[in-house]
Amino acid sequence: MIIAKSQRGDIVERIHQAHQGVEKCQLRARSCVFWPEINKDIEGRVPKCEVCQESQNTQAKETLESHEVPTRPWQVVGTDLFSRDGDEYLLMCDYFSKF
C-alpha cells in the first residue's frame, strides 16, 4: 500500500511500536507499506526513541577469524551439541567436504 505524505509519520510510529530496531522495522514496513525513502524515515525515527536506546545491543561484534582450508577429508572437524524434543545430539561436520 502506498502511503500519503500526511500519513507517513503515523505509520512510522505504528511500525516502531514494538521497539525492535531499524532492521526489524524496515522488514515489517516492506511487508505492507511503501513510500519513497521509507528506510530513511525509519532510520531517523529509531535513534530518537529512548526505549530503543536503553535496550540496544551494547556488545561489540567479534571479528571473524578464518581458518586454513583442509587438504584432505576429516582433517578438520566442527562439532556442536544440541537437544530437540528431549533427545540430545552431537553434530559433526567435515570442513573439507562440508559433510
Image (cartoon, rainbow, N blue to C red):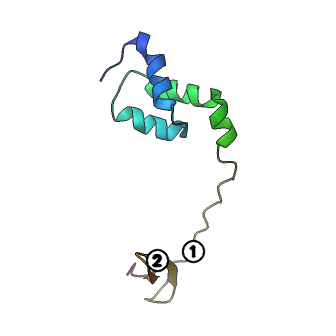
Tell me the mark number nearer the camera, choosing from 2 and 1: 2
Place of residue 31 in the rendered image (x, y in percent of width and height, measured from the top left): 34, 35
For marks 2 and 1, the one nearer the N-term is 1
Q: Nearer the viewer, residue 17 or 12?
A: 17
Q: Position of residue 61 (x, y in %)?
A: 64, 55
Question: Against 84, is 47 above or below?
Answer: above
User: Could you classify mark 2 by the number of other residues whose Cα lies within 10 Å: few (under 14), some (14-19), or many (20 or more)?
Assistant: few
Q: Position of residue 99 (x, y in %)?
A: 37, 81
Give the class, few, some or many, for how many residues have Cα within 10 Å of label 1's Cα (few <14, many ≥20): few
**Left-right relation of 70 to 32:** right
Up/down of 17 relative to 59, above or below: above
Q: At 65% across and 43% down in the image, what residue appears?
A: 56
| Residue 67, numbered circle | 1
Q: Residue at x 57, y 74 (%)?
A: 67
Q: Quadrant of residue 68?
A: bottom right
- Element carrying mark 2: strand
Q: Tell me if residue 20 comes above or below residue 29 in the rendering.
A: below
Residue found at the far top of this picture = 6
- Quadrant of the snapshot with the N terminus: top left
Q: Residue furthest left?
A: 1
Q: Amino acid at mark 1?
A: His
Residue assigned mark 2: 83
Q: Nearer the viewer, residue 45 or 71?
A: 45
Of the residues shown, which amino acid type is indicated by label 2? Answer: Ser
Give the side of residue 22 with respect to residue 2, left or right. right
- Splitting the image into 4 quarters, where does residue 36 fall? top left
Q: Position of residue 70 (x, y in %)?
A: 50, 83
